[in-house]
Amino acid sequence: MNKNQEISDHLPQPSPREQDQLYQLQSNHSEFSPEHLREPCRSGILGAVNAAFAKYNRRAKTSHSPRSGSHSINYNTQQLAKSTLSSPPPQQSHMHRSQKRGFSVGWQFWAVLVLLTSGGLGFVATALLLKLPSVPNCPKIFWPTASASMRLYCSQVAASKQTSEDLLEAIALVDTLPNNHPLRPEINRNIEEWSLDILNIGEQSFHAGKLEEAIKIARAIPEGVSAYNLVEERIGRWQTIWSKAEKLYSQAEYQLRQSNWNQAFREAVALTYVENKYWSSFKYDQLSDNIQIAQKESEKLDKAFNLSRSGGLENLLAAIAQAEQIPPKSYAYKEARDLIGKCGDKLIKIARQRLEERNSAGVLEIANKLPASLNRPQMRQDLMDLGLALSASESGTVWDLEEAIASVQKLDSNRPLYEPGQKLIDRWQREIQDIATLERARTFANTGLTTDLKTAIAEARQVPRNNPRYQEARTEIERWTYQVQTIEDRPYLERAIQLASYGGAPSLREAVREASRVGSGRALYQDAQSRIGQWSQSIQRIEDQPYLDRANQLASSGSIPALRAAVQEASRIAPGRLLHQEAQARIKQWVNRIERTEDQPYLNQARALAYRGDLSTAIGTAARISSGRALYPEAQRNIKLWQTELEGKRIVQEAYRVSSVGTPEALKQAILVARQVPTSAKARSEVVIMVNRWSNQILAMAQERASFDLTSAIAIAKMVPSGTKSYQQAQRQIQAWQDILKPPPVILEPQPRKNDQLLEVEL
């Protein structure tokens, strides 16, 4: 139970009448309720006090029990209201209880009041300290009544914007003050500074490419300031630089019109040395872009020239398309037009060649792809007509050939392709004659008889070599000749096949002799030779298989004499025979087994000697296996390994011998010797330990020597080789000793020059 509850329990309970009076008093003075005490004067001290008092009442409400809480709260509220409104004092017993309750509330109230009062005063003091003074509003100041300090302040504000108009306005604001004004020195200093700023702004406009604006800004500087004397000089320099830049730009443009790219670029580079950012950067970039555009157009033209020189339909069309991209205003336009004309001539040449080759599709392709920029409509039409006529003649019928001739005969003698058309007409007329000759020959050949086939061949041979159907006649002659030869040679081949079917070497030999009667170049010659090869292989297998079987039987025992006998037996199969490769493979296996059986004891003995450490004897034993033997590669690998081990041991012993002297030089030499041990040797691990130990000894000697001779210590420490554990420590020690030995800087007095000494002598 809290303190308020104890006080409430000791107070006498009010009667119902007293409760009604207290309720009436509360309703009449409801402004003192906690809800109303929080509203007014929130930021003032009284408001804070009321809020604290209301908080206390709320705590009293929550702390009382349900039975006595309402009476205690009403009673407390009645006493508070009476004390606040200066109502008549209650009876003595009530006063005594009120004084007791007030004493319980007072220390909390005053504590809160003191805290709030001190916090409020601190907040007000801090706000007053941090509050900035109001800044004058210069645009709304009435200048005739403004003070000099106000004018100076506003002029400085205007000048801080760093524009020519604001700087001139700043000068005008303060320049009206009399010369004897106390602020005049400060004003004059500001005016001088602002005048130089105006001149610098003009310089910026000059570098931005605005010469007239820069001149206008510079001439706006008022007279009477020191910067005014620089105006005309500055303007003159600007105009000189500008004239020089314009001259360089004009020269570069002239060289550009002449297609002198290198000279134009030199003139453009000269702009970068002009003392003006507009010309040295913007105009230079602009001129460089123009040069690059011209160069790109030139590159396009060069690419077109390269395509034109490459030849071929697609390359020529691509060259024309590339040249057509050059605009009429370009410097390379005339060259582009000339190139288009030359490419057109090459296209026509290809078209004429295709006409001679009777390539109708190729002629029509050129006719359709011929660019309109060539301006050759008659050539396009003639190519189209001749291409269609060629396409019609490809069927090879007399009717289509006559139609093609009639179509080409329509070309007048003044047409571009009149002569090629006449050649085609002559060819097609001869082709019609050849068709009749070949038709008679085919009539004879259709019977299939040998005599008729030979008559057809003779008839077809009447077609001349230079006639259009000559190749067709040759094809028919070859086909009919093949039929004649097949009819004549088929009996020989069929008899040979019948003989070979009996099997056995004699029958196969007879079949080979019979098939050999088919002569070279005849129709069945390849078939006969293929069968002869098969029968010959069968003969060889029948003859040589017994040798191979006996050799396999001998080798099956596995003894060296038996293997040697098997090798001798299989060697009877001669080279070029069917089973020769198989026999040689078997012979190689048997020889390998013989050699391994003979040489394996030597290799085993050598390995045993090496295991015991007798490497020299092991090497001599393994060397007994001669070159070319089966185990020779394996023996050589072991010999090389043992030789490496021997060499490693020898080098290690030599390194120990050198290091026994004990001097730094000897230890360094020993390390160099030890590092010669091959990496594959077992002694390599010992070498690493040796090298690190000797390096530590060298470093220890250097450190010992450093106690009385740093120079010698540095020399010894430098002997520590890289790659050792002591190397980095040695390098740091060397650096430290060198820093100790480094002499202090010497300040040299300036010496008189030789000319001055001579002058003194002459005087």
Image (spheres, grey):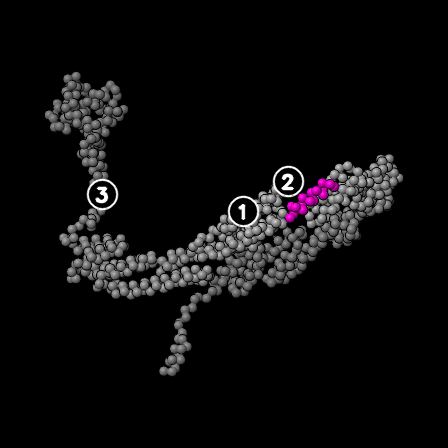
Q: Amino acid at mark 1?
A: Gln
Please state the extent of the stretch shown in magenta in the rendering.
426-441
**Local crowd size for mark 1, using a 10 Å CA cut-off: few (<14), some (14–19), many (≥20):** some
Mark 2 lies on a secondary structure that is helix
List x then y, in percent, for residue 735: 50, 60
Quadrant assignment for the C terminus: bottom left
Q: Which mark is residue 184?
A: none
Determine the residue located farthest toward the bottom in the rendered image.
Answer: 762
Real-space Cα separation, disc 1 to disc 2, in angstroms: 24 Å
* Mark 3 and mark 1 residues within 8 Å of each other at the beta carbon: no
Q: Residue at x 27, y 65 (%)?
A: 232
* Mark 2 and mark 3 residues within 8 Å of each other at the beta carbon: no
Q: Residue at x 18, y 34 (%)?
A: 41
Of the two numbered discs 3 and 1 on the same chain, state the one appearing first in sequence.
Answer: 3
Left or right: 591 as drawn, with respect to 740: right
Q: Amino acid at mark 2?
A: Trp
Does the segment drawn in magenta span residue 482? no
